[in-house]
Image (spheres, rainbow, N blue to C red):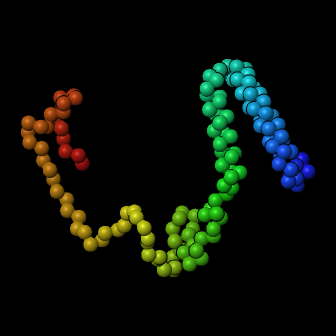
């Protein structure tokens, strides 16, 4: 197999690719049959389509892992100025970093006003149980 990786012979590489493709098809078929046999032995016969879907999902996950590898974003170290503890809270004594981007933000300047919205007497009957609707506490 090492010779295969070191050769530049296009015809040899093409033949190897064809052989590997056929072997892969054979292994896929064998895997499908084995999955069906395992399902039968467990008493939970999985339909052919479900076992094929499961296999294809696993194959796609493996190919994505091979193609993209681990994400470089996950391997970055956090900024040393804003270390966080296990709860995700910033260390006390460190200055708060200004938030960027979208998302909820505190709006301390807004006033909170409690206001009751009473229902008219003709709308205080529940349409489901025909009981009296009471204000929520």
- Is residue 46 visible in this depiction of the protein? no
Q: Residue furthest right?
A: 3
Is residue 54 visible in this depiction of the protein? yes
Q: Quadrant of residue 55?
A: top right
Which residue reaches farthest left? 121
> Where's residue 5, x and y in %?
86, 52
Going 81% across and 43% down the picture, which residue do you hit?
14
The quadrant where residue 85 appears = bottom right
Where residue 87 sits: x, y (%)?
54, 63
In the displayed structure image, the side of residue 83 where residue 109 appears, left or right: left
x then y, percent, for residue 44: 65, 21
Count of numbered marks? 0
Residue drawn at the location 40% of the way across and 64% of the way down:
102
Image quarter for residue 15? top right
The residue drawn where x is 68% and y is 40% is 59
**Left or right: 26 as drawn, with respect to 76:** right
Image spot of residue 7 (x, y percent): 88, 53
Taking the image as shown, residue 44 lies to the left or right of residue 28, namely left
Front position in the image: 130 or 33: 33
At horizontal 84% and vertical 45% (from top left) the residue drawn is 11
Image vertical order of residue 1 relative to residue 39, above or below: below
Q: Is residue 38 above or below residue 111?
A: above
Q: Nearer the viewer, residue 122 or 44?
A: 44
């Amino acid at each position: 197999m090492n010779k295969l990786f070191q050769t530049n012979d296009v015809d040899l590489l093409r033949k190897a690719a064809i052989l590997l493709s056929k072997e892969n098809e054979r292994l896929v078929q064998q895997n499908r049959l084995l999955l069906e046999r395992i399902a039968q032995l467990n008493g939970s016969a999985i339909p052919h389509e479900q076992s094929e879907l499961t296999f294809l999902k696993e194959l796609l996950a493996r190919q994505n892992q091979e193609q993209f590898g681990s994400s470089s974003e996950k391997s970055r170290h956090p900024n040393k100025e804003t270390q966080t503890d296990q709860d995700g809270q910033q260390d006390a004594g460190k200055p708060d970093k200004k938030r960027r981007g979208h998302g909820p933000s505190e709006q301390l300047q807004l006033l909170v006003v409690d206001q009751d919205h009473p229902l008219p007497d003709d709308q205080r009957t529940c349409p489901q149980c025909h009981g009296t609707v009471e204000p929520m506490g």
